Amino acid sequence: MEMKAFQVLSVLLLSAAVTDAQSFHVGKCPEPSVQEGFNVTQYTGTWYEIEKLPAMFERGKCNQATYSLLSDGTVSVHNEELLANGKINSIDGVAKVKDPSQPAILGVSFFKGVPDAPYWVLSTDYQSYSLVYSCADYFGLFHIDFAWILARTCVLTEGVISQLHDKLSAAGVNVNRLTGSDQTGCDGHGLRHRK
């Protein structure tokens, strides 16, 4: 069993070295503090990606996410991006609070039969910014993490971005790996203000 885990780890680390697309780390996922008193209703609406840790499943620009409250208390998730060929790539999922005592910790499901992806809201003011963290632990040997700085508009002030970098650093996230997201030239492709 240990040899198999080592082989899986080796393949994944080699893949990461080749693609340089993910943030691999030795050991278990950190457990950063999350937004206190999180209100999912106030969080709904559209958020635009400002910065992120590399994510191989994101291949375009103009990345945005729209969240809508469903009647059963779960949240509809609609993610969109504009690909280089001019086509809109989108995916739909459902997010749900894992534990009512920690409403800022959600799990997002995009495919049936696949475990939920963690979605931790570390900080938000609901009106302008959101800081989201996700981490997947593999055998307790290593983890892959993701982070997104989101905004209600396509830009965010440097002061707010700097504060969010500090929060990520305090959580043990390497902010030097964050990349800026391209939100230019998106209006003409039907991505902005879609319902």
Image: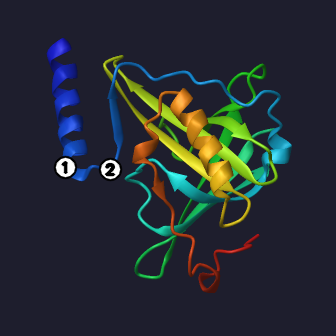
Q: CA distance from mark 2 to mark 1?
A: 8 Å
Q: Are marks 2 and 1 in contact (CB under 8 Å)?
A: no
Is residue 46 placed above or below 140 in the rendered structure? below
Dot 2, how many residues are within 10 Å of its Cα: few (below 14), some (14-19), or many (20+)? Answer: some
For label 1, the residue is 18
| Residue 165 higher or lower than 26, as above or below | below
Q: Label for residue 21?
A: 2
- The residue lying at 18 percent from left, 36 percent from top is 11
In-image side of 42 versus 139 (left or right): right
- What mark, if any, has residue 154 been given in the picture? none
Q: Given the current orientation, which residue lies at the most extreme front position?
A: 159
**Is 180 on the left or on the right of 17, as rendered?**
right
User: Can residue 70 be seen?
Assistant: no
Q: In front here: 141 or 184?
A: 184
Q: Quadrant of the N terminus?
A: top left
Which of 128 and 188 lies nearest the eye of the viewer? 128
Q: How is the image coloured?
A: rainbow
The kind of residue on which mark 1 rests is Val
Q: Is residue 24 left or right of residue 105?
A: left
Q: Residue at x 70, y 37 (%)?
A: 123
| Residue positioned 48% across, 32% down in the render | 135
Q: What is the secondary structure assignment of the residue under circle 2?
A: loop
Q: x, y percentage for residue 156? A: 67, 59
Residue at 48% over, 78% down: 87
Decide: is 167 above or below 52. Answer: above
Q: Is residue 128 in sight in this rendering? A: yes
The C terminus - image quarter: bottom right
Residue 94 in percent (x, y) is at 65, 45
Judge the density around disc 1: few (<14), some (14-19), many (≥20) Cα neighbours within 10 Å.
few
Looking at numbered disc 2 in the image, what kind of residue is underneath it? Answer: Ala
At mark 1, the secondary structure is helix
Measured as percent of width and height from the top left, residue 164 is found at 62, 42
